[in-house]
Amino acid sequence: MESEAGVAPSGTRITIAGRELVNFSSNDYLGLAFHPEIASAMAEAALRYGVGSTASRLICGTSSEHLALEEELAAAKGTEAALVFSTGVAAAMGTIPALVGRGDVVILDKLAHACLIDGIHASGAKMRVFPHNDLTKLASHLAWARESHPDGRVMIVTESVFSMDGDVAPLHEIVELKERYGAILLLDEAHAVGVRGGGAQGLAGELGLGARIEVQMGTLGKALGVSGGYIAGTRTLIDFLINKARSFIFSTAPSPAVAAACRAALRIVQSAEGDVLRARLQENLLILSTELNMATPSSAIIPMILGSEERAMAETERLFEGGFFVPAIRYPTVAKHTARLRVTVSAAHSSEQINSLCKAITYR
Ligand SMILES: *Cc1c(COP(=O)(O)O)cnc(C)c1O
C-alpha cells in the first residue's frame, strides 16, 4: 500500500513478548529502514557483489559501491572527501586516536556518547569535560589547554543533537571558541543527519558551518536507516585516516550490499521525497508537543524526565500495557535521578499513533 506522497508504509510496530506494540524507541527517524527501494538496492547489490566484502578495505574489501558512497557522502556534506566505517562507534574509535594522543587535550561535552569517551580514552590524550553546552566552562578549558599544552593539539568533541536529551549544541559559539583558541572540532551528527538541515547536511549544514568544522562524524544507521559510520572532511584528513584509523584498517569492510543500500538511502534523503519525510516528521513532532503542552522539540528525540528509576520503569510498563513501546532510560546511560522515557518520533508514525500515545501518557 502506497500513501499519497508515494512513501511506502514502514515499521512503526514491534512485537515484544508476543505483544504487538507501537514502537516509539527506534532511531529510524524517516522510516527508511523499511523503504522498498533501499531494500531492493541492498538485495541487488548482494546478488551482484556478494553478501560480504571478504576482506578489509585496504586488502581487497573495497568495492565500487564503497567508493561511490564516499563520494556521494562528501558531496552531501559539502566536504572534499568522506570515509565510511562499519559503524559510528568504529568511526569514533578509529578517528579520535588517529588525531590526538599523548601531549594533546580533548575537551568533551558531559553528555557526549560513550564511543566518543572510549575513543578519547584509547587515544591517551588528556580529557577535560565541560558541563552540557556550558560555553563558559568550555572557554576556560580551552584557555587552560592552550596554556598548559602549547605544542599539543586541542580538540573539542561534541554532538549536534544529543542522543538522550534531543537538544542541540550552540554550534556557532562553539565554532567561534574553537577558532579563537586554535583548536579543532569533531562534531558527531548521529541524531542530526537527515533530521536537521536539508538532505544529509546535519546541523553543521543547516547553520552554514560545515566548512569550519574539521571532522564531521555521523552514522548511516539512524535517519538513513541502514548501518555504518562516516567521517567527512578535507582530502588530507581522509587520506590520513585511511592510513591511521585502526578500526578502518584492521576491520572487514562493510558489505558492498550495505554500501549500496546506504547510497540509495542517501539519494532519498536528498530528494523531494526526503523533504516530504522531514516535513511529516515535523508535523508529528508538532502534534506531540502540542498535545503534551511542551516546547517544539529540536529533534526527533523527546525526553520525558521522571526522576526516579521506579517511576520511569512503572510508566514504561503502563505504556506497554497500553500498546506502546517507550523505553525507560536509566543510570548509567543518563545521570542519576534523571531517569526518563525516551520517546523517538518517526515520519513513519501516523498522526493517530502519535495522538494515542499522547493520550496514554498520563504521568505529567
Ligand atoms: C548511535 C550513536 C553513535 C554510534 O553509531 P552506530 O552507527 O550506532 O555505531 C555515535 N554517536 C552517537 C551520538 C550515537 O547516538
Image (cartoon, helix red, strand yellow):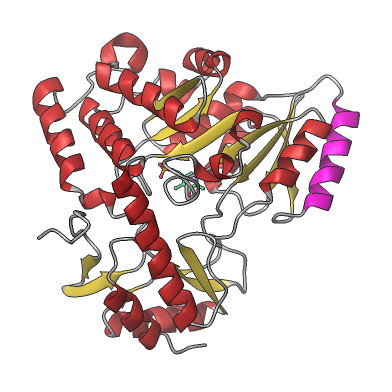
Of residue 15 and residue 310, the one placed in the foreground of this image is 15
Note whether 67 is above or below 350 in the view shown.
above
Q: Is residue 325 shown to the viewer in this render?
A: yes
Q: Quadrant of residue 214?
A: top right
The spot of residue 126 in percent (x, y) is: 74, 34
The spot of residue 335 in percent (x, y) is: 62, 65
Of residue 231 and residue 90, the one placed in the foreground of this image is 231
Residue sitting at 56 percent across and 79 percent down? 308
Residue sitting at 54 percent across and 47 percent down? 114
Q: Is residue 29 shown to the viewer in this render?
A: no
Magenta stretch: residue 289 in it? no
Q: Quadrant of residue 188?
A: top right
Note whether 276 is above or below 315 in the view shown.
above
Note whether 87 is above or below 20 in the view shown.
above
The spot of residue 296 in percent (x, y) is: 54, 70
Identify the magenta region. 135-149
Q: Residue placed farthest to the top in the image?
A: 59
